[in-house]
Every structure is written in C-alpha cells, then in structure tokens.
Amino acid sequence: MLLLKLAIISCILVVAPSVATTTHAATYYVAIAGNNSNPGTNASPWRTVAYAVSRMGAGDTTYVNGGVYNEGVIAFRTSGTQSAPIKLLRAPGQFPIISCRSPASGVYPMIVLQNRSGSRYPIGWITIEGFEIRNCHDGIKFYSLRDSTIRGNWIHHSRGNGIFGYGTRILIDRNKINNNGSPTTGSHGLYASGSYFTITNNLIYGNEKYGIQLNGSSTSFYDPSKHAGPEYAHSYNWTIANNTFAYERIASGIVIWGSTCSNARIENNIFYENGVSSSSSGAQGINFISTSCRGIVIRNNLAYASGSGATRFLGSGATAGVHYTQSGNIVNTVAPRFINAPATAPSSPNFALASGSPAINMGLSLSATSTSYLNIPRPQQSYYDIGAYEYRLSSAQLAAPTSLQNAN
C-alpha cells in the first residue's frame, strides 16, 4: 500500500508542472476607433499597438486594423514558445501604419524586443508582419532575440537603422527597408550580429550607409552580461539570398565585418548603383572590413553600376580563396532591367524585372527563397531568378506594385 501511495504522489509531481504551464491563446484586435479600456475583442478593440503588445503572452495574436498609429515605444517584453508563438499582424485586407512620435526626455520611439529581465536573457518566438513602420529612432530593435520572424513590413525613414540588434535564428523576409539613417546619424538598413540569420526577398535601398551590416567585429564578442549566449554575439552561418540592393548613399549593399562571420552564403542578390556618393574605386556590392573569417560563399549575384558612384562588386578587405569563394556572378556586363529604376533613384522605384532582364532564370534553386517578394512561388519558368522579384510572363508584371501596401 505504501508503495502504491508513493507511486501516486510521484505521478502527481510529474504531471503538475505541465498543467501549470498550459497556455490559453487569445486573439486581440486594435483599431483607430478603439479604446485601451476595452477588452481588445474584434467588436471592442484596443486603441494602441503598444498597449496590445504589453498585454500579449505566449500563444497570443493581435490583429491591427488600418490607419495611422502615432506610437512611442512598442515593447515586447514577454517571450513566446515554439508551440505558442506571439504574433503581431495586420488585419486581413488592412494596412496599418506605425508612425513614431518625436523623441522626448531621452525616450526613443521604436519597436523593441527585450526580455523584461534584461538583455542577457533571451526573448523569442515572436512574429511582426504586415506594417508600415516610419519615422522611428530605429524601426525595429532587438536584444538576445531567438527564433523570430520580421516579414512583409515597410520600414523607412528611421533616424537610425531600419532593423538593429543581435540574436539567433532570425528570419527577415519580404520587407521593404529604405531611406533609413541620415548624414548626422549614418546608420544602415539592417545592422545585426548573431548566428543563423536568414535574410531573403527584401528590397533594401536608399539607406544612408550599408544595406546590411553583418557585424562579426570584436565589439560584438560574447559578453555574458549582455548576451544570452555566444550564439547571440558571433555572426556565423548567415544566409543572404534573393534580395535587391540599390541606391545606398555612401556605402555598398553589404559589408562583412570582423572575425566571427564565417560560413555566410550570399546568393541570388542584385546589387545596383550603391555607393551613390562614393568614388568609382569603392565597392558597391559587398565590402569587407577587417575580415578574417572563412567559408564565405558568394554565388550567382548580379552587380551593376553605371559609374556615377562606386563601381566595384567586391571590396579589397578580404582574399579570394582564403576568406571567400565566388562563382556564377554577373558583374558590370549588363543592367538588370527593372520596370522603373534608372541610374539615379526615382521617387518611387519599381524593382520588378522587365522582359529581357539578365536576372531571369540565372539564380540558384534555394529552399530558403521558394517564394518571392510578392509571395509568388519560384521558379515561374525553368530556374529561379536573381533578386527579390520573380518574373512572370504576363501583363500583370508591368503593373507590379511600387509600395508594400499593394504588394501584400
């Protein structure tokens, strides 16, 4: 009898924790006509995105309706889980705009993801999808972020970086990231450190400095008081594929910096007229700074510059065959033939591929980019195309959208 009682008690102790951690997912709504004193239902939505984010826990989803939301700091402080992620999404058929207020008293408006216990604790399993994010300090900033997705957003005119932070296993897909930074702040389209970043199908253009800064420098070396683990600091195993980089003002599309950037794969990208204010000897495609990491693979990219700014595909700060290998790249032989992207940036460029583009059918088949910027399956013809778009044999291609609102 005693053995039976002990067995029952043992079973209770094993089962009890799983009962205590059961997640009850909720769905919330935000609308311009809402009120934060409402319950956050579809019929009685909340008013601000910041309030909704502060209320969400593991498994929760918030849908945001159309309109302009003048927000301060939108802070994710709670982590989702693999089976119960947190999702901040635009409502179907809507296009919400997060327009950051001016900074006040040292508070810089932005979307920030940081564990409430501090940056050395991880936060993760969070998705942000379908927003225009404008006029922020940094558009989206994260600390020790893991297993999260930033998809289908239009991030522009940040005073600092469009996306900025450190993490591991981050997907950044199908975003438009443009005109971030300024002559005062410098800054980039995307500046990050950490491991296993996947950056695909994005339009990255017109930013003050680099389109992407792959930061593997000594300043990002693992610090246990700052990072949740070394994989959040050391920048290895990145995939940068099927993006279009254009018109970055004083720098190249990508910079690979430091000694912890090994095994990056840079494939199927278009680099076009970057380094607008640089000398012709500068790199407009991929630059290297103090690069001593190994195993960088650069394949099947298309790079073209007319000569009004930087013209080189690759910078001189790394050695071919030692730090990187390259193959299948199309360099300065023919322009990519976009629908509307002349040598000088127009007010609303359209980077969809026109008939006869040398990018058509010239890409590698990559599982990471099986759909394009417009969420169209690849390939549409025999092989993947290079760049964020996939060419379609129809008149619809001529009407390709010029804003994220129409693209999604």
Image: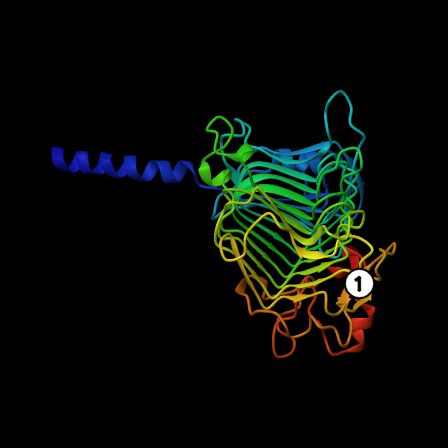
Residue at which label 1 appears:
401
Which percent across, then down, holds residue 380?
65, 75
In the picture, measured across the screen, residue 45 lies left or right of residue 24, that is right
Q: Which of the image's four quarters has the C terminus? A: bottom right
Determine the residue positioned at 50% across, 58% down.
Answer: 321
Q: Which amino acid is tagged 1? A: Pro
| Residue 209 higher or lower than 225, as above or below | below
| Residue 68 higher or lower than 350, as above or below | above
Q: In terms of secondary structure, where does tag 1 sit?
A: loop
Q: Residues within 10 Å of mark 1 (few under 14, many from 20)?
A: some
| Residue 278 higher or lower than 182, as above or below | below
Where residue 389 sits, quadrant-wise, is bottom right
Which percent across, then down, holds residue 67?
81, 45
Using the rendered image of the protein, determine whether residue 151 is visible from the camera's viewpoint: no
Count of numbered tags: 1
**Residue placed most toward the observer, 74 or 138:** 138
Determine the residue positioned at 36% across, 36% down.
Answer: 17
**Residue placed most toward the observer, 83 or 303:** 303
Q: Which of the image's four quarters has the N terminus? A: top left
Which percent across, then down, holds residue 358?
71, 73
In the picture, measured across the screen, residue 4 lies left or right of residue 88, that is left
Using the rendered image of the protein, determine whether residue 287 is visible from the camera's viewpoint: yes
Determine the residue positioned at 15% across, 38% down.
Answer: 4
